């Protein structure tokens, strides 16, 4: 299963945000173990670096980006993605970019903590808990 991880899932892990940390860590672990094919949007990488650099340190931000790049494939943000995002009628442009990048990459689902941000999605959208439950059922 190809899954695009929303920025908030990764930040929950890197910033150890309760109560989301444990489930986010578990789903990221599945990508790390190649039990699912993990993807992140190119904008997620820059956003994570910026936020962790401001919150913790640039050194820690660089370390997290190195880890992220070892685990995840990167879905592109190009002109087609941005043009589609502008007309996607998502309430949040960043979510629209992530979603359009997911479509262009051909993922099977989007993983987010905020499913309401993706109500216009034609792709399945799951929380970490939902995805873990689905994968458990598939075994």
Image: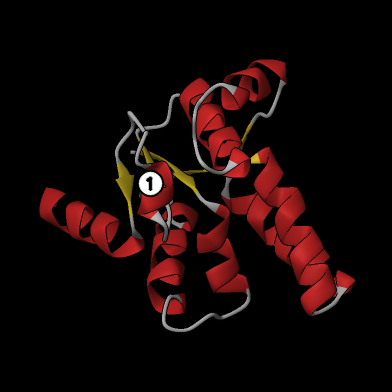
Q: Residue at x 43, y 48 (%)?
A: 117
Farthest residue toward the right? Answer: 58
Q: Residue at x 70, y 43 (%)?
A: 43
**Residue 91 pos. (x, y %):** 51, 41
Farthest residue toward the bottom? Answer: 18
Q: Which residue is mark 1?
A: 36
Using a 10 Å C-alpha cutoff, classify the residue at mark 1 as few (fewer than 14 neighbours), some (14 to 19) or many (20 or more): some
**Residue 109 pos. (x, y %):** 36, 39
- Say if 55 sits above or below 126 in the image: below
Side (left or right) of 134 relative to 124: left
Write down the quadrant of residue 59 in the picture.
bottom right
- Say if 28 sits above or below 118 in the image: below
Badge 1 element: loop
Side (left or right) of 39 relative to 125: right
**Residue 80 pos. (x, y %):** 65, 15
**Residue 127 pos. (x, y %):** 33, 58
Q: Residue at x 56, y 29 (%)?
A: 101
Side (left or right) of 102 relative to 119: right
Q: Can the viewer see residue 73 in this picture?
A: no
Nearest the eye: 1 or 104:
104
């Amino acid at each position: 299963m190809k899954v695009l991880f929303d920025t908030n899932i990764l930040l929950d892990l890197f910033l150890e945000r309760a109560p989301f940390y444990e489930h986010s860590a578990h789903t990221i672990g599945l990508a790390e173990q190649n039990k699912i094919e993990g993807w992140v949007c190119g904008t997620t990488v820059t956003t994570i670096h910026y936020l962790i650099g401001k919150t913790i340190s640039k050194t820690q931000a660089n370390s997290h980006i190195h880890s992220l790049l070892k685990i995840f494939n990167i879905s592109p943000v190009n002109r087609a993605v941005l043009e589609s995002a502008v007309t996607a009628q998502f309430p949040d442009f960043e979510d629209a970019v992530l979603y359009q990048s997911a479509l262009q990459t051909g993922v099977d689902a989007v993983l987010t903590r905020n499913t309401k941000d993706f109500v216009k999605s034609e792709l399945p959208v799951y929380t970490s808990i939902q995805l873990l439950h689905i994968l458990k059922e598939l075994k």
